[in-house]
Amino acid sequence: MAARYACTLGCVAFFVVIARGMIDGQGLSATLPACGAMALFAGIGAVAGKISEAAVDESVEHNIRAEIAAREQAAAPREETPAPRLFRRE
């Protein structure tokens, strides 16, 4: 997930800076700033991807543990509780 965010944000930043350079008439001289923007936003994307991946993993693990606990509790033998004294025959 982190690699996808890094690649996406890096490519978007690269193409935005190249497009801005072409619009301003800079031509290929905008390549160096575009590479810098690509590296910067790829780093930001990698960090954002790692954070989101950790959040998703933690959420899934929590849900699985809760499901396992619920199934174990449902499968555990239940002890019968004695009837209240008013209704017991002696």
Image: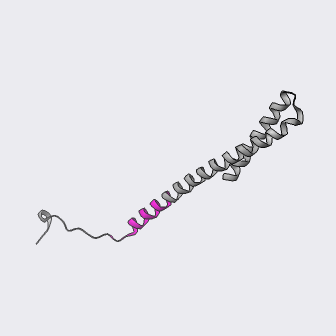
Residue at x 47% of width, y 62% of height? 65
Q: Nearer the viewer, residue 89 or 70?
A: 70
* Residue 21 on image: x %, y %: 83, 32
Q: Nearer the viewer, residue 64 or 19?
A: 19
Whether residue 11 is visible to the viewer of this picture, yes or no, is no
Residue at x 34% of width, y 71% of height? 77
61 in relation to 23, above or below: below
Question: Is residue 18 covered in magenta?
Answer: no
Residue at x 84% of width, y 27% of height? 24
Whether residue 80 is visible to the viewer of this picture, yes or no, is yes
Using the rendered view, name the quadrant where residue 74 is placed: bottom left
Judged left or right of residue 90, residue 74 is right
Residue extending farthest top: 24
* Residue 1 on image: x %, y %: 66, 53
* Residue 7 on image: x %, y %: 73, 48
Question: Is residue 70 covered in magenta?
Answer: yes
* Residue 76 on image: x %, y %: 37, 70
Magenta stretch: helix, strand or loop mostly: helix
Q: How many marks?
A: 0
40 in relation to 69, above or below: above
Q: Which residues are magenta?
A: 63-78
Residue at x 67% of width, y 50% of height? 46
Q: Quadrant of the C terminus?
A: bottom left
